[in-house]
Image (tube, rainbow, N blue to C red):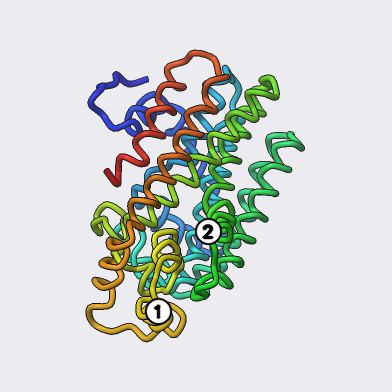
Amino acid sequence: MGLMDASQKPHDRLAAWLADDMAAVNVLIRQRMASEHAPRIPEVTAHLVEAGGKRLRPMLTLAAARLCGYEGENHVKLAATVEFIHTATLLHDDVVDESQRRRGRPTANLLWDNKSSVLVGDYLFARSFQLMVETDSLRVMDILANASAVIAEGEVLQLTAAQDLATTETIYLNVVRGKTAALFAAATEVGAVIAGVPEVQVQALRDYGDALGIAFQIVDDLLDYGGTDAAIGKNTGDDFRERKLTLPVIKAVARADAEERAFWVRVIEQGEQREGDLAHAKALMAKHGAMEAARAEAIAWIGKARAALAVLPEHPLRGMLDDLADYVVARIA
């Protein structure tokens, strides 16, 4: 375990503490994304997996297992499983959203084609199920299979909720719980389950992952209107151009007068966007305090995440998970 500098970001301190485990996860990922018959598969997956993403979800699995005193090897398989599920959803997402950048690089569907992205995503889902079976835990399989279904459900819900100004904050939360929080929650929960800790600790780690995931997505949605391309690894304003009803937009629409609502109908529901519309959308959000209100909700979810950790044993990793929660909202300070 590497020496840690207190000035490092919480994510980097976590990575340093878990360096040996993460190295094992990376080896396993490379082994399992190989394909004897279809070289396109490792080409596409390597583009995403080697892109230098934060690997946050697999680290959460490793951290949860180690925090709970786990000494076996299944946490490495589960961390790789979580990363494969995540990568599969990214490949599919980029096709659905017609995205051109992911983690600051061209997306796989742009470099290859949509067919490759969809089929390689399917391959990674299949690989993830092979890996989780190797843990011989029916409960672990149940958690991750359920999360995979919820993720897909969240994506389909987003299709119907997007571009519909009737979308409420409740519907938005259901989308976020599906597309982001479900995998965060499963990642932390399975780490606790394989460690065999009391149920109260399993639930605590699940609650932590759920709340962290919700806050993480709200922050991502805020950064799309107030961050930089480098901060979010994609083009700012993408959500606006893709006509996604994210939390700051929903809040601005709820407070809009008739003239403002007509603007939102034009740019979101009708998709008729002109030069200067993104700037006007930001101005309306500022006028109604939509960004601040969304940020307050993210901070509230972080409070829930930190509170959930209270029942867990004293451990350096508990402190790092606590700091990580704070860091998620510090990105929009």
Q: Is residue 46 left or right of residue 310?
A: left
Q: Earlier in the sequence, mark 2 or mark 1?
A: 2
**Which residue does the numbered mark 1 point to in the structure image?**
258
Which quarter of the image is occupied by the C terminus?
Answer: top left
- Look at the picture and state if 205 lies above or below 27: above
Q: Single out the residue that lies furthest toward the top.
A: 314
Which quarter of the image is occupied by the N terminus?
Answer: top left
Q: Nearer the viewer, mark 2 or mark 1?
A: 1
Q: Nearer the viewer, residue 287 or 271?
A: 287
Q: Amino acid at mark 2?
A: Glu
Q: What is the spatial separation of the Cα atoms under label 2 and label 1, in whole angstroms?
A: 20 Å
> Which residue sits at x=35%, y=80%?
259
Q: Is residue 130 visible?
A: yes
Q: Amino acid at mark 1?
A: Ala
Q: Single out the residue that lies furthest toward the right.
A: 138
Location of residue 319 in the rendering, given as x and y in whole percent from the top left corner: 41, 21
**Which residue does the numbered mark 2 point to in the structure image?**
169
Picture quadrant where residue 325 is located: top left
